[in-house]
């Protein structure tokens, strides 16, 4: 059905939509390690890892991360260099720093217990509105409303099959309208699994979203250079700018810019002429 942005769904339409999603989920749900727990720390870790990273890669790294840092206190007291060692392969390393800062705040302000309020979750480093709401849903079964890529896929497929430039506020309204408020944890898992399957079968329809942006190539990018710098410092502990340039085989101008950026973000620090992970 092609939906007008102002028209509400009928109760029968909502029931039929839920039945279809749940029927698929009962038969085909993914067995993901973070779905076997309601532990807020573990769910937080998985949600941060899943930001801009494919679920298959996260599944590989999640178990190792939990073994190394099983709770907020262990993560809070661990050196960033050790966290980067375990994080290696997930990319977007500022997320690892954000997790450490979150752990420090949770231990310091809330005695190691993650708050359940969405506004408090959103105040944490690296946690935006959608991630805060997803943590609230999965960790505390709170009927919060949010959109991520697989959920967007489902709603584009069912309610906007021919439209382009669909805005998230239109999808959010439908997410709220169809939400199973008795069990949002399971409902959102079902939506995400259905969306993942739609992408496999029909390709990614998110290009029809008004918010779609094609990701730039990784090879030769600043993201790649930043990752190379951090991997090198994990191995070498401390390097001067010239030593780093030889290790990563990069011209000094680009390297200086990347190092300055990493230093501003707290991912590296400069001690005298040498750089290291804090």
Image (cartoon, rainbow, N blue to C red):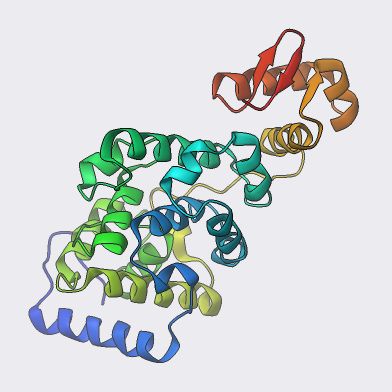
Query: Which quadrant holds the C terminus?
Result: top right
Q: Is residue 214 left or right of residue 113?
A: right
Picture quarter containing residue 247? top right
Q: Where is residue 98 drawn, in percent x and y?
A: 47, 37
As drawn, the residue found furthest toward the top would be: 272
Q: Residue at x 23, y 57 (%)?
A: 145
Q: Where is residue 125 drawn, in percent x and y?
A: 40, 35
The image quarter containing residue 218 is top right
Q: Taking the image as drawn, is residue 151 in sight?
A: yes
- Is residue 161 among what the camera can see? no
* Front residue of 277 and 129: 277
Count of labels shown?
0
x, y (%) of residue 23? Answer: 32, 90
| Residue beneath the point at 42% across and 66% down | 150
Quadrant (top left, top right, bottom left, bottom right) of the N terminus: bottom left
Q: Residue at x 35, y 42 (%)?
A: 128
Where does the image place residue 123, in percent across and percent down from the top left?
29, 35
């Amino acid at each position: 059905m092609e939906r007008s942005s102002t028209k509400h769904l009928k109760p029968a339409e909502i029931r039929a939509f839920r039945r279809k999603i749940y029927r698929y989920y009962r038969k085909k749900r993914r067995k993901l390690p973070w779905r076997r727990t309601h532990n807020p720390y573990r769910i937080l870790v998985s949600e941060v890892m899943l930001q801009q990273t494919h679920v298959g890669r996260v599944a590989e790294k999640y178990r190792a991360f939990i073994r190394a840092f099983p709770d907020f206190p262990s993560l809070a007291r661990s050196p960033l260099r050790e966290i980067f060692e375990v994080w290696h392969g997930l990319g977007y390393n500022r997320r690892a720093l954000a997790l450490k800062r979150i752990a420090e705040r949770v231990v310091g302000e809330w005695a190691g217990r993650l708050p359940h309020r969405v506004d408090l979750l959103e105040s944490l480093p690296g946690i935006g509105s959608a991630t805060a709401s997803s943590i609230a849903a999965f960790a505390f079964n709170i009927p919060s409303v949010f959109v991520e890529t697989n959920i967007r896929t489902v709603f584009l497929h069912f309610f906007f099959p021919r439209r382009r430039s669909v805005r998230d506020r239109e999808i959010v309204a439908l997410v709220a309208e169809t939400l199973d408020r008795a069990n949002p944890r399971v409902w959102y898992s079902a939506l995400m699994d259905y969306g993942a399957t739609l992408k496999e079968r029909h390709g990614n329809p998110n290009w029809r979203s008004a918010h779609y942006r094609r990701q730039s190539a990784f090879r030769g990018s600043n993201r790649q250079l930043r990752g190379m710098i951090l991997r090198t410092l994990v191995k070498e502990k401390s390097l001067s700018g010239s030593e780093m340039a030889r290790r990563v085989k990069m011209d000094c101008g680009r390297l200086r810019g990347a190092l300055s950026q990493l230093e501003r973000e707290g991912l590296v620090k400069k001690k005298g002429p040498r750089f290291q992970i804090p």
